[in-house]
Amino acid sequence: MFRYVTSGESHGKCLHSILEGIPSGLKLWEEDINKELARRQRGFGRGERMQKIEKDKVEITSGLRWGETIGSPITMTIINKDWENWKKLMSIDASDKEMKTRMVRPRPGHADLAGALKYGREDLRDILERASARETAARVAVGAVCKKLLAEFAIKVTSMTEKIDGIQAEVSNLSPEEIERLSELSPVRCPDKSAEKKMVETIEEAEKSGDTLGGVFNVLVINPPVGLGSHTQWDLRLDGRLAQALMSIPAVKGVEFGGGFGMTGKPGSKVHDRIFYEPGRGYYRKTNNSGGIEGGISNGENIIARAAMKPLSSLKKPLPTVDMTTKKEVPAEVVRADICAVPSACVIGEAVVAFEIARAMKEKFGGDSLKEMKGNFERYMEETKSR
């Protein structure tokens, strides 16, 4: 079984992740995870909390011994530094309850109202604390471990910002390696310097006006093997799993692979990727409109996923809403938040995609130890080249 769960609230004491299924023998250090957590916190447009308060660090409390995984579940904890300012408001003790602190003005576009009605809560904070994107820090920790596993098979997961508020990056002349390098140097994770400048200026304008911005980000899986996922059942299709993982990121409203929606306006002869064969190399394609997945199965080309992120729901100049106690029109709650989180969503996207690719690898190649899994992988790769 390859799975994970997370727990914890945005301003609670901490966040937890439990990851099960990583084979034994994988070299792993807390710093591997901390690097990914730091990447998630960066990005122009992040709010005050990420810039001035939180310095995310992980503590691994199980599944690791002497810098090596031992095959048991890996437990990771991230302390919320802002908890010190919220101890009474987020207390588990009933004696700390204060009705005057209730939040009763739901934000349009957020989980506030739907969650309160579903769970029968009188305080919106009971919903927004868990619905907050702060939870994704726990998922980035999971993704960091999965990236370490994938690296053992020469598989890399990277990302870039393609668009913010209609400003489109041009990357058609860049290789995947150049996209990765330039994105890491960019404050908005955009490899196009011209578009980057415009994105930064647009975010600054949105901050001044009390608004938020969305955009589009890409996640790229470099060098995946052919054969991950399956066509045999709906829930085994790799693109379906990846789409679900990306759609589970807060504020993501759409996902496509390869040419995606753009292929709907073209004939099949202009869309499908021709197949070629070369001795020693095997089958390959010169185009990748399918985004590396055909029939729910990876075809050996790089996997290209694209996700659309809506503007965030927490506005400094809030929209009108309805007070849950008086039922009268009022301004929505003002909650401290980011102006634009697309650069951060890139890193979160990497994490959830890395988990799904690692899960598909474990299903395909099995193995309780890394040595066993690698042996299965190497034999399979040799066989596919000779077919």
Image (cartoon, helix red, strand yellow):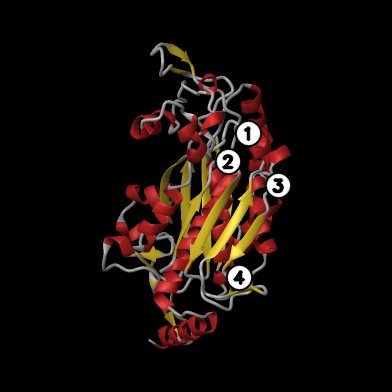
- Neighbourhood count class around disc 1 (C-alpha, 10 Å): few under 14, some 14–19, many 20 upward: few
Q: Which numbered disc covers residue 55?
A: 3
Q: Position of residue 142 (x, y in %)?
A: 54, 59
The amino acid pointed to by label 2 is: Gly
**Which residue is at 59% across, 38% downward?**
11
Which residue is more in the foreground, 72 or 294?
72
Q: Position of residue 52 (x, y in %)?
A: 73, 38
Tag 1 near tag 2, CB within 8 Å:
yes
- Neighbourhood count class around disc 4 (C-alpha, 10 Å): few under 14, some 14–19, many 20 upward: many
Is residue 20 visible in the rendered image? The answer is: yes
Real-space Cα distance between discs 3 and 2?
15 Å
**Which residue is at 56% across, 75% downward?**
70
**What residue did someone put label 4 on?**
64
- Closer to the observer: label 1 or label 3? 1
Q: Which numbered disc covers residue 86?
A: 1
Q: Which mark sits nearer the N-terminus, 1 or 4?
A: 4
